[in-house]
Amino acid sequence: MKKCWRYILSNLIFIVGTLSFINASGQLAPGEIAKESYYMFPIKPGERNTLAGTMGELRSTHFHTGIDIRTEGRIGLPVYASADGYVSRVAISNSGYGNAIYILHPNGHTSVYAHLDRINGKLANYIRTQQYKSESFEQNLMIKKDLFPVKKGDIIAYSGNSGSSGGPHLHYDIRDKHQNPLNPLNYGFEEILDNTPPLAEKIIVSTLNKNARVDGQFGQMTYDARRVGNNYVIDQPIHAKGEIGIQLYAYDKLDNSRFRCGINTLEMNINDKLVYSYDIQSFSFSEQRNILKHMSYENLHFTGTRYHKLYIDDGNKLNFYTTDQNQGRIKVTVGQELPVTIKMTDAYGNESMLTFKIIGKDFPESLYSYDNLKYDIDVIENTFVYKIPKEQTENGVMLNGTSTVPDYFINNTGIYLHDMRREIPKVLQVDKSFKTYNFKDKVPHEMDYKYYNKFLDIYFPSNSLFDTLYLKTDYKLDTVDQQEYFEIGSTYVPLRKSIKVTLKPQGHYPKSKYAIYSVYDNGYKSFEGGSWEADKVSFWTRSFGKYTILSDTIPPKVTPLTLSSNSLRFKISDNLSGIKSFKCYVNNEWVLMNYDSKRALIWSEKLNDNKPFTGVVKLLVEDMQGNINEYSNTLN
């Protein structure tokens, strides 16, 4: 009876929502993404729910496209269709969204339900049939209209933890007719309670050119925010001069939830004038990579903290900003007093403010303060920074053969700032000692460009870079284990698109079992692959870093867990290159094996539940370098 009343109520809501919000063309107009009751909440509708993530939240490589609905830390909760429509697509994968259903609605929107454990009804049978037909676990099925119609409130699946999910939950999207994500919280879900305004923790104030200073220094300075009621202040004034930029670490928390979610709207005003605003209500998937310029990618790399830049950085092509003529960059002159207010607004209209003052000030050439620069040698934007103790500079300092003087001192250490747009630093001479650097070339971002040297070639397609790149490369041979290492660029510099790298190893490698691996700071190695041509090996990558060439000759490991007439379960793993594929046969007939790489587990799913497994079971598991483990056993 309860389910019946829920169904009746949902259809009444659907009728009212349809009459109120669908225009004559059947497509929601852009101005009509106000709160409405067209959609049913997909998990425990009508009951209180909590979220672990919101639309627009900053992730490491992308903006989050929907909401993550918590499922009590378990799998198997019913997932309800949000509105009438039909299943337009189903994707089954071990990565990304995992098991996902896409429903197209009469208003032109598509709702997406991802990380599902299992899919319900006739649709599940259809998917399984397609898997057996193609002999493949992974599927991307575009489904004809009316083949699988759904009604609002139908149970379409059960929640899970499939794909790249980090824990049980339902990822839920609403997308427009162009498949651009919209904010689901704009659609009036009373299941979510949020009276909590956004929280601010700290800001970074950055110098944006060689001549700027913050509290007397070049680089970036961090200031903690103090809470006052629902608002925040930076207690001390920030002294600066020149062109600077503000970065904000802030997040939203919903009621009854510990998770740090995204803030949809940010505004920065100076002297009560808007200089920057950010309002993320929709965006294109093709724009996602620009998040690496919206955030401070360097701070993410070194600290794991995701800062919003409250200015438009070079190379950022996102279009949900409104700024002044300086694109949010603040130009501070000596004697100015600039009151700054940053307003943060979440999807439910809760607001909080962060306030502080910037005071324009000139600074002495010698400071007695802590050093904000992390390294003795660094590159910040277009500036090469190096530090030399004052007592070592009595006989002069030369960069590329030209005498140079420090821009300022900190505690008797000279800070030297070199504009790399004028000249790439190659050799630094201090007294009679010499230091060489691995900067090899200045690479433009707006055109195709090729770089060559003895150890590697790099092809940069047009716009693969966000901005001009000061390219570093290095080659090292570990003479103990005879291992070659190729270093390309800096890991904290992001790439917009993939580049082609051709390594020219100095050693000899049998091609069949050798491939390229990226090498991380912690020693972890990740398979990149590559294609050999003569003594060169090429691959495409979207990350700078360290690479080497390794051999993998060990087949994957197979451990049987269950072998019965009803079920086959195995653990599969690989020592280095990773699992590429697996195929299971019973009496030479292909058997569907579901795969969860997080648990290194595969398990059978029959096409015909009434047909027992009997005879010879054969499992073939192949790794990325072509090594195959063939396991076989006999079921009586």
Image: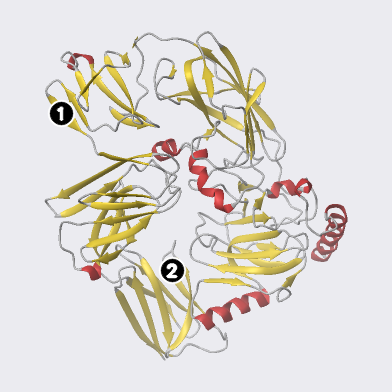
In percent of width and height, residue 566 lies at 50, 83
- Image quadrant in which you'd find residue 636: bottom left
Identify residue for label 2: 601
User: Which of 379/419 is in front?
Assistant: 419
Image color mode? secondary structure
CA distance for labels 2 and 1: 56 Å
Label 1 sits on what residue type?
Phe
Q: Quarter of the image containing the N terminus?
A: bottom right
Q: Is residue 288 left or right of residue 487?
A: right
Q: Earlier in the sequence, mark 2 or mark 1?
A: 1
Q: Is residue 187 left or right of residue 93?
A: right
How many marks can you see?
2
Identify residue for label 1: 434
Residue at the location (32% across, 71% down)? 557
User: Which of 404/254 is in front?
Assistant: 404
- Image quadrant in which you'd find residue 563: bottom left
In percent of width and height, residue 168 lies at 56, 57
Name the mark nearer the viewer: 2 or 1.
Answer: 1
Label 2 sits on what residue type?
Leu
Residue 310 visible in this rendered orientation of the protein: yes
In percent of width and height, residue 238 lies at 50, 16
Crowding at mark 1 (Cα within 10 Å: few <14, some 14-19, many 20+):
few
Q: Is residue 548 left or right of residue 14?
A: left
Crowding at mark 2 (Cα within 10 Å: few <14, some 14-19, many 20+):
some
Vertically, is 517 above or below 418?
Answer: below
Vertically, is 214 above or below 91?
Answer: above
**Regarding mark 1 in the picture, which secondary structure is present there?**
strand
Q: Is residue 186 left or right of residue 71?
A: right
User: Which of 131/1 is in front?
Assistant: 131
Residue at the location (52% across, 14% down)? 236
